[in-house]
């Protein structure tokens, strides 16, 4: 029988420990809803290249945040309680990658998704998923951060949350994205991260019905605006995002016929 022993956290576990501690600083709450995305599923199947669900949700949310600045805010408690409003949207998407024999989570950063095409966003997303980990600048920064001494990491978070909110939102996102459902497993609690808003995405809709969760910092937004935001995400997916997918299908058909 193996003896009990202390085990040093790996680099990947240290990074997640930091992310969870950062999320614990905020007063997070979550709302959930089912989306009927059967029409969008059909468009997605026909579009070339195939656009991932993470990219579709990212574009939809960023379009809304462009017109609603409160979605680009975070709470700052020092030296007095106030909100900081970022001038642009930055998405931070959770990605699972293998590095040095460890399956771990890293975070892909997307700058101003609302102003970029679905194809461009998908290409960048694929690069994050497939490029060697150490060739990705964002991943190198995160791995390097997890290597810093414990007290340096804690000081860094305090500075980002209290003195440099611009850098916090620029590096770690105005909103985050993670999975809320995979196969038959559902997220049943708040998503945790350094973002004031975290989208939970279902990448495997069952019969066109997708789960969606939105975890938010209650010090930034109240419940009714968040419920309205969930409605807006749904309408934008079925509106502007679906229209862009339809445009991709039309362009590919014209290329074939031409």
Image: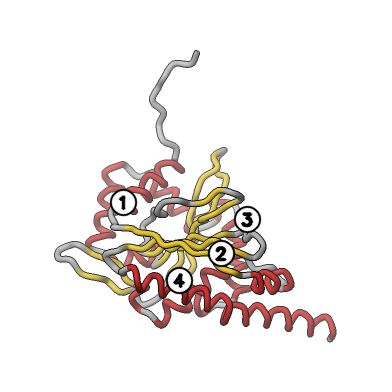
Residue extending furthest top? 1
Rate crowding at label 4 as few (under 14), some (14 to 19) or many (20 or more) other CA atoms within 10 Å.
Answer: many
* Spatial separation of the CA atoms under disc 2 and disc 4: 16 Å
Comparing labels 3 and 2, the label whose residue is closer to the camera? 2
Q: Position of residue 28 (x, y in %)?
A: 33, 58
Q: Name the residue under label 1.
A: 24
Q: Where is residue 18 in the image (x, y as percent from the top left)?
A: 36, 47
Compared with 256, 6 (above or below) is above
Q: Which residue is drawn at 52% across and 74% down?
A: 234
* Spatial separation of the CA atoms under disc 4 and disc 1: 23 Å
Rate crowding at label 1 as few (under 14), some (14 to 19) or many (20 or more) other CA atoms within 10 Å.
Answer: few
Image-quadrant location for residue 42: bottom right
Q: Where is residue 70 in the image (x, y as percent from the top left)?
A: 33, 75
Q: Mark 4 points at which residue?
A: 230
Rate crowding at label 3 as few (under 14), some (14 to 19) or many (20 or more) other CA atoms within 10 Å.
Answer: few
Comparing labels 2 and 4, the label whose residue is closer to the camera? 4
Q: Name the residue under label 2.
A: 54
> Which numbered disc flags the more N-terminal residue, 3 or 2?
2
Q: Which residue is drawn at 58% across and 52% down?
A: 182
Comparing labels 4 and 1, the label whose residue is closer to the camera? 4
124 sits to left or right of 63: right
Question: Mark 1 touching mark 2, by CB under 8 A?
Answer: no
């Amino acid at each position: 029988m193996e003896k009990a022993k202390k085990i040093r956290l790996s680099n990947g576990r240290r990074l997640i420990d930091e992310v969870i501690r950062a999320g614990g600083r905020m007063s997070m709450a979550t709302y959930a809803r089912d989306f009927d995305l059967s029409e969008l599923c059909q468009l997605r199947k026909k579009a070339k290249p195939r656009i991932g669900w993470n990219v579709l949700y990212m574009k939809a949310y960023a379009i809304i945040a462009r017109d609603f600045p409160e979605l680009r805010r975070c709470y700052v408690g020092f030296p007095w309680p106030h909100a900081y409003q970022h001038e642009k949207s930055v998405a931070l998407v959770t990605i699972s990658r293998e590095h040095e024999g460890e399956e771990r989570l890293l975070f892909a950063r997307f700058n101003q998704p609302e102003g970029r095409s679905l194809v461009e966003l998908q290409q960048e997303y694929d690069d994050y998923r497939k490029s060697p980990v150490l060739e990705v600048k964002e991943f190198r920064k995160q791995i390097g951060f997890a290597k810093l001494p414990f007290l340096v990491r804690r000081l860094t978070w305090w500075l980002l949350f209290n003195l440099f909110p611009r850098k916090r939102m620029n590096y770690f996102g105005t909103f985050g994205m993670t999975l809320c459902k995979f196969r038959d497993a559902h997220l049943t609690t708040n998503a945790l991260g350094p973002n004031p808003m975290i989208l939970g995405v279902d990448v495997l809709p069952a019969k066109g019905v997708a789960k969606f969760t939105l975890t938010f910092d209650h010090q930034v937004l109240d419940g009714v605006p968040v419920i309205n935001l969930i409605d807006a995400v749904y309408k934008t997916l079925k509106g502007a995002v679906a229209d862009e997918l339809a445009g991709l299908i039309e362009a590919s058909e014209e290329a074939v016929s031409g």
